[in-house]
């Protein structure tokens, strides 16, 4: 979590972690330091994967071998994409494949059904649903498919339920079973949880 770290601290952390590990996810890099951190990594022969609409990066030395865990990630709107991309990078760092579909919220409910059909056909192990405003998309998805759902309420909204409060409350109060909820804007936490679920499922399938 780089949001309040100095540029020199971020660089030091990356170098020290990669002495022992193949990859590291650095989240919420301050915008004024983002390009410099990416350039620093590349100058040190490190590969950098970036995310759309966010300043989170996946840095690695060697290609990350996939385990077969598969995660679907959807957003209600385009404003939610940055948080979704944090989840994607986290899942990929944990050796999962990701299928994404963005801007398919309940303002045009018909958009979600072809996406869910494709997710089921692709046999995703878990779906991450990222939504702000009232956060209703998570309940809709959870009531439609038979896989674990992780809801991420985002701080997109205004008025009484601003800063994600309404979305969080809505997801926590959902009538739909099988929906787990993380904190507001917690794309990293949702990605880690989803990857653990997907990898565990595939591990058990190999054993049986």
Image (cartoon, grey):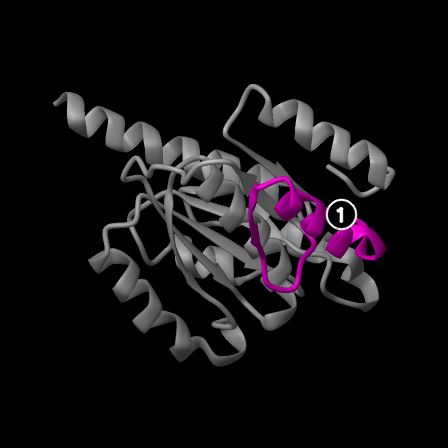
On-image quarter of the C terminus: top left
Please state, as top left, top right, bottom left or bottom right, where the N terminus lies in the image.
Answer: top right
Residue 63 spot, x, y in % from top left: 41, 40
Of residues 11 and 141, the one nearer the viewer is 11
Residue 129 placement (x, y as % from top left): 49, 55
Instruction: Report which quarter residue 114 is drawn in.
Output: bottom left
x%, y% of residue 187? 60, 46
Q: Which residues are magenta?
A: 30-55
Residue 47 lies in the magenta stretch: yes
Residue at the image point whose x is 32% and y is 28% from the top? 200
Q: Is residue 129 magenta?
A: no
Q: Which residue sits at x=23%, y=56%?
A: 122
Left or right: 126 in relation to 3: left
Residue beneath disc 1: 29
Q: Residues within 10 Å of mark 1 (few under 14, many from 20)?
A: many
Question: Relative to residue 18, is residue 150 drawn left or right?
Answer: left
Is residue 173 visible in the rendered image? The answer is no
Name the residue rendered at 62%, 54% in the picture.
Answer: 83
Q: Answer with the quarter of the image where residue 82 lies.
A: bottom right
């Amino acid at each position: 979590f780089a949001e309040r770290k100095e540029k020199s601290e971020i660089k030091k952390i990356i170098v020290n972690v990669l002495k022992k590990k193949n990859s590291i996810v650095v989240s919420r890099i301050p915008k004024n330091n983002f390009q410099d951190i990416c350039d620093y990594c590349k100058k040190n022969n490190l590969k950098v994967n970036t995310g759309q609409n966010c300043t989170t990066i996946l840095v690695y030395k060697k290609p990350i071998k996939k385990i077969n865990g598969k995660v679907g990630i959807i957003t209600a709107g385009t404003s939610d994409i940055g948080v979704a991309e944090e989840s994607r990078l986290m899942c990929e760092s944990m050796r999962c494949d990701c299928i994404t579909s963005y801007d398919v919220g309940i303002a045009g409910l018909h958009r979600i059904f072809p996406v869910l059909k494709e997710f089921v056909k692709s046999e995703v192990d878990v779906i991450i649903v990222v939504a702000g405003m009232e956060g209703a998309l998570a309940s809709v998805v959870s009531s439609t498919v038979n896989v674990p759902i992780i809801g991420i309420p985002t701080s997109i909204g205004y008025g009484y339920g601003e800063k994600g409060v309404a979305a969080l409350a809505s997801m926590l109060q959902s009538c739909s079973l099988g929906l787990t909820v993380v904190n507001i804007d917690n794309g990293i936490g949702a990605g880690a949880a989803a990857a653990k679920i997907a990898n565990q499922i595939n591990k058990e399938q190999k054993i049986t």
